[in-house]
Amino acid sequence: MKGGPAKGELVIAIFELANCFRNGWGVEKDPVAAVKYYQTAAELGDTDSMNEVSLRELTSQIEVT
């Protein structure tokens, strides 16, 4: 990974911050902030964040009847 171990730790921290905003862990729930942080981590190569972004896009395209 370009940037070394420090970049990897930063990406994990961004992903975990997104989880905090998504679930309201220590902060008020904020789905918009969660998505922003997931997208940032995904752009930095975090596969878990990529999954979260993809799932959100998929579920927003599915009509629930």
Image (cartoon, rainbow, N blue to C red):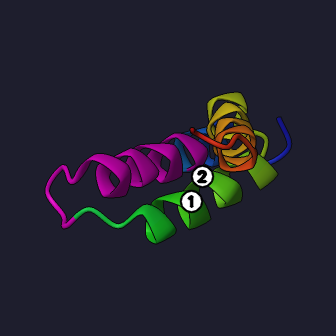
At x 72%, y 30%, the residue is: 47
Measuring from the top left, give residue 10's x and y in whole percent.
Answer: 55, 50
Measuring from the top left, give residue 17's x and y in whole percent.
Answer: 39, 53
Q: Secondary structure at mark 1?
A: helix
Q: Is residue 60 magenta?
A: no
Name the image quarter holding residue 5.
top right
Q: Is residue 20 magenta?
A: yes
At x 19%, y 67%, the residue is: 28
Q: Amino acid at mark 1?
A: Val
Q: Is 27 or 7 nearer to us in this picture?
A: 27
Measuring from the top left, give residue 7's x and y in whole percent.
Answer: 66, 47
Q: Residues within 10 Å of mark 1 (few under 14, many from 20)?
A: many
At x 14%, y 56%, the residue is: 26
Q: Amino acid at mark 2?
A: Tyr
Secondary structure that dominates the magenta span? helix
Residue wearing tag 2: 38
- The span picked out in magenta is 11-28
State the separation of the CA atoms marked 2 and 1. Answer: 5 Å
**Residue 21 appears left or right of 32:** left
**Residue 23 appears left or right of 10:** left
At x 45%, y 47%, the residue is: 13
Name above or below for residue 37 compared with residue 20. Answer: below
Q: Secondary structure at mark 2?
A: helix
Residue wearing tag 1: 35
